[in-house]
Image (tube, rainbow, N blue to C red):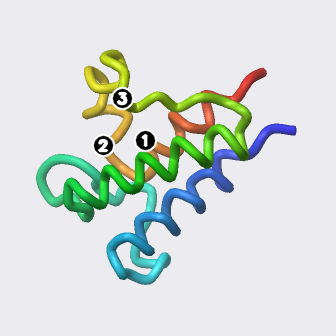
Amino acid sequence: MSVSYDEVEKYVREEVASLTNRDATAVGPETVLVGTNRIVDSADLVMLLLSAEEYTREKLGAVFDWTSDSAMSEARSVLRSVGSLARHLTDLQPA
């Protein structure tokens, strides 16, 4: 059974809220993770990615290797926002 985008987005929003000491309702799919106006600092981003790696393995049955060269080269698009990260994680699920 696959996990829906909405469920994955909720997970990412809650993780970001927890890391930044914000209410989860203040974090949405357009919340910026990297670049100008980002909500997380570099340490928070690493913590988020470690958590996302574990979540992807345990809940989605997939591998999110954010340390690979390809993940880093596309980091600006995949990590651009809460929504883009949630979409990427959702798409990693096996068919």
Q: Secondary structure at mark 2?
A: loop
| Residues packed near mark 2 inside 10 Å, few (<14), some (14 to 19) or many (20 plus) | some
Q: Are marks 1 and 2 in contact (CB under 8 Å)?
A: yes
Q: Farthest right residue?
A: 1
Q: Which residue in the protein does label 1 denote?
A: 84
**Residue 26's image quarter?**
bottom left
**Residue 60's image quarter?**
top right
Q: Which residue in the protein does label 3 denote?
A: 67
53 vs 28, left or right, is right
Q: Which residue in the protein does label 2 denote?
A: 80
Give the quadrant of the N terminus.
Answer: top right
Indicate the amino acid at tag 1: Ser
Q: Which residue corresponds to the image point at 30% horizontal and 24% vertical from the top-left? A: 74
Q: CA distance from mark 1 to mark 3?
A: 17 Å
Q: Which residue corresponds to the image point at 44% horizontal and 56% vertical from the top-left? A: 29
Indicate the amino acid at tag 3: Thr
